[in-house]
Image: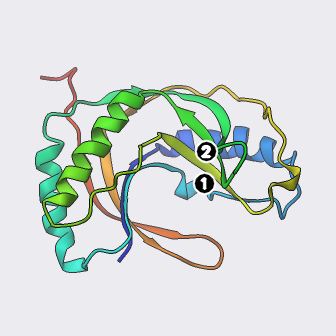
Amino acid sequence: MRIFFSVTLSPEIKRLINNKVIRSTAENFQDSTIRWTKESDLHITLLFIKNINPNSIKQLVEHAKVELSNFNTFKIKFLDIELFPSSENPKFLSYKISAADQLTKLFDSLNLASQKLGLAKDDRPYRPHMTLGKILSSASIKIPIKNIELPEFSVSSIVLLESTPSPNGSNYKELYSINLHDKTHK
């Protein structure tokens, strides 16, 4: 089973990204150049686990709750639209995300939770981003791409999603949600 921990976005933010960013950016590309992320699937991946026994998920969530118990809610802002992982070898069109330190700490904590189950540590450097679309052909990708300002938003929970691959991109199903502490209401 393929799963991942993520920051999910509010329906309002998803709608803004779809209407203001994806639609206006898509006008600059041929249809076959980018497979755009569906509005309902917009998220910020924290830790991807490509192979886990479904019977271990509940235990993973319990470990994650312990590791995340000291995290407070925090704010995120979308920064620049970028080619990811690099402009030389673009695989995705994505938004760079603020709060990199906080997101990296979440990644590290979730990595530790997965290791408690005996899963391999993800040693790749974590680079916060939100995928806008998968680049299918980079021949017509031009930078700079116009950035569209979006409001910052609060991260109040971490969600565990199941990812099921399909020919048209992955399908996601929410499995669990873990709330972060609201530091304004103690």
* Label 2 element class: helix
Question: In the rendered image of this protein, does residue 158 appear above or below residue 101?
Answer: below
Q: Is residue 65 left or right of residue 34?
A: left
Question: Percent x, y for residue 24?
Answer: 80, 41
- Check disc 1 and give the amino acid type: Glu
Question: Percent x, y for residue 164?
Answer: 47, 75
Q: Nearer the viewer, residue 7 or 106?
A: 106
The total of numbered circles placed on residues is 2
Question: Percent x, y for residue 16?
Answer: 63, 39
Q: Nearer the viewer, residue 140 or 69?
A: 140
- Check disc 2 and give the amino acid type: Arg
- The quarter of the picture where residue 138 lies is bottom right
Q: Which mark is residue 91?
A: none
User: Which residue was labeled with disc 2?
Assistant: 15
Q: Is residue 72 left or right of residue 46?
A: left
Residue at 18% of width from left, 79% of height from top?
55
